[in-house]
Amino acid sequence: MKQFEEKKFNIGKLKGFSEKTIEEHLKLYAGYVKNSNLIIQKIEELSQDTEKNAYALSEVQRRFGFEYNGMRNHEVYFDLLSDGPTPINQDGELIKSITYLWGSFDKWLAQFKAIALTRGIGWAMLYFDKKEKKLLNAWVDEHHLGQLQDCTVLIALDMWEHAFVSDYAPSGKRQYIEDFFANLNWQKVEEILLKSY
Ligand SMILES: [Fe+2]
């Protein structure tokens, strides 16, 4: 079976996020790629005797959503931090949709930031619902619990502590969120949206 491959990202100097944090964080991402491949291999091995390995098989299978979404969420996160920050296109489809749904960009942003402050580990997400052709904000616990089916992730903001505690104190979550938006390449968000229609 074709293996998942670790992607490379062109991440330059970022506001607030140290090079060391990004370096360590990319190692964690590599771990999710490795484990997604490993789980598929383990499932194949255990499937040689599904009766004998029934319990192990279901436990390993259950972990796949965690590892796979851990891999994919990080790919969106690092991609959005790549190639330097760009502002949101004031005439683009994204801001039109946001303004239509939330009334203003600032209202949407305030709501998104509040979601990002959800207690516990997980992700603040902006999705594009392909069936309804509309945007949705959401919180995802861990990497996988609460992912919205058949929706495209436009923004993935990592709210696990490993993403920010070495640069910000644990109480510095708000500043980390602010800096994420200062570092964000909005052009890429717009491109993902346009590809998702
Ligand atoms: Fe992470």
Image (cartoon, rainbow, N blue to C red):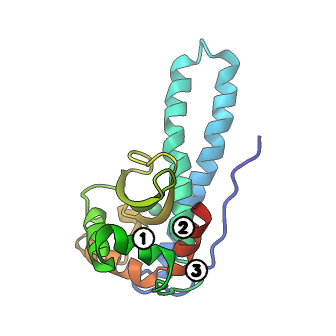
Residue that badge 2 annotates? 193
Instruction: Using the image as rendered, state which of residue 32 and residue 89 is in the foreground.
Output: 89
Q: Where is residue 29 in the image (x, y as percent from the top left)?
A: 55, 60
Q: Which of the 4 quarters of the picture holds residue 115?
A: bottom left
Closer to viewer: mark 1 or mark 2: 1
Please tell me the numbered disc located at residue 97.
Answer: 1
Q: Going from the N terminus, do you reach mark 1 or mark 2 first?
A: 1
* Residue wearing tag 3: 11
Distance (Cα) linking label 1 and label 2: 10 Å
Q: Which residue is drawn at 60% across and 12% down?
A: 51
Distance (Cα) linking label 3 and label 2: 21 Å
Identity, as a three-letter code, of the amino acid under mark 3: Ile
Mark sitting earlier along the chain (3/1): 3
Q: Which residue is nearer to you in this view: 70 or 90?
A: 90
For the residues labelled 3 and 1, the Cα–Cα distance comes to 28 Å
Amino acid type, callout 2: Leu
Amino acid type of disc 1? Ser
- Is residue 59 left or right of 161 when viewed as pictured? right
Q: Residue 89's mark? A: none
Q: Residue at x 43, y 60 (%)?
A: 134
**Mark 2 neighbour class, 10 Å CA radius: few under 14, some 14 to 19, many 20 or more:** some
Image position, residue 4 (x, y; %): 69, 51
Q: Which quadrant is the N terminus positioned in?
A: top right
